[in-house]
Amino acid sequence: MKITEIIIRHLQMEMKFSFTTSFGTVKMKNFLLLEAKDESGTIGWGESVAFDSPWYTEETMKTNWHMLEDFLIPLILNKEIHHPDEVSEIFAPIRKNNMAKSTIEGAIWDIYAQQTRQSLAQALGGTKDKIEVGISIGIQNSIDELIEVVDNYLKEGYKRIKVKIKPGLDIEIIRSLRSAFPHIAIMADANSAYSLDDIDLLQQLDEFQLIMIEQPLASDDIIDHAKLQQQIITPICLDESINSLEDARKAVELGSTKVINIKIGRVGGLTEAKKIHDYCATVGIPVWCGGMLEAGIGRAHNIALTSLPNFILPGDTAGSSHYWEKDVIEPEVMAENGYIQVPQTVGIGYEVNRQIVEAYTVEKKIYR
Ligand code: OSB
Ligand code: MG
């Protein structure tokens, strides 16, 4: 295929809830959608998971647009591409900026799947026809509110509950949650809010049988996480620290992580995500698919990836209606009893609703 036209849109979508982590709050989601067309007219879609401020990683919606416009799109337009795995090689001269790279790569995987008459899941080597998902709950105003929110999600059928913690909002929250729900799978995500000075506190969490603690220490660390893992029972799961297969290998070899959260955007695309998945399968490290409060296109890519066999643990890809009044795809992503069906139709398996996309678009630019 040859990509002959790319459209970038800035979308603004209001979420149904404010999502608060140890570093920031998201309510109005600003993000980029990328539409790529090849010489035969096939269209593929990609979604940038960068937020409008750099609290999760250094990338933002605007840095993504800059990287796409000035560096990545010029490398892709009119170049003959035989397989989406070539995209990461084409982008190799550009350092980092993984979310920007992933935005184009995702659209090219979508086109490739359509042209080879496969679902995106099949094209990636997926084997599951349904995936198990959990829910990620931001910091709430009070413990009572949190317990009520968790109770509602359990009633909706979600079976794994992830809660955000930060210093001062940790032990008591987890203790109350565990006593309210003695038998459910609970995990905590710190988004790198602690340091090795907090070892005593992190050890106290051991008594609550969390299935894992996600990214307790610095966002670029793998050394201190290895030290911490030697002193706590709760398995550590790295999120922010893993940006490539090489990062995953080093973290696993050091003993810094027992589980890996794979986010397509954070690692630079589906090709790298699949490599991390495959490596983890060979060394016995279970993986799960993280979430970035995606709209439908990003969500569809996450579902396809999660259909690979070593996505053993439930991910954060909840149904569309959890986040949005009206998502940009049809049908919307439906989670039933904690499961999402993997679409079997060609490409991402959902139709993009152009009317809705236009309604949420605040700016758009065409590149040829
Ligand atoms: O750390 O996993 C995270 C959302 C935004 C930024 C970072 C994270 C999250 C989540 C996933 O916890 C939320 C979701 O997509 O439902
Ligand atoms: Mg996380």
Image: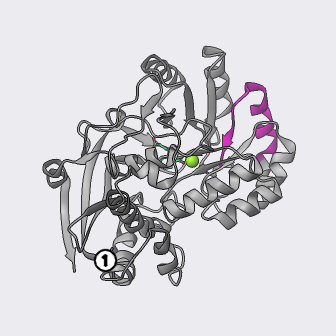
Can residue 217 be seen at all in this image of the molecule?
Answer: no
Q: Specify the quadrant that holds the N terminus.
A: bottom left
Could you say whether the residue bearing mark 1 is in a helix, strand or loop? loop
Helix, strand or loop: magenta stretch = helix
Q: Specify the quadrant that holds the C terminus.
A: bottom left
Judge by depth and name the residue closer to the eye, 33 or 301. 301
Label 1 beta carbon within 8 A of ligand 1: no
Q: What colour scheme governs how the chains and residues are painted in the rendered image of this protein?
A: one colour
**Residue at 77 percent of width and 53 percent of height:** 256
Magenta residue span: 198-215
For the image, the number of numbered tags is 1
**Residue at 35 percent of width and 82 percent of height:** 79
- Residue under label 1, please give it: 2
**Residue at 68 percent of width and 40 percent of height:** 213
**Residue at 61 percent of width and 37 percent of height:** 313
Residue found farthest to the right: 230
Can residue 174 be seen at all in this image of the molecule?
Answer: yes
Magenta stretch encompasses residue 361: no
Magenta stretch encompasses residue 202: yes
Q: Amino acid at mark 1?
A: Lys
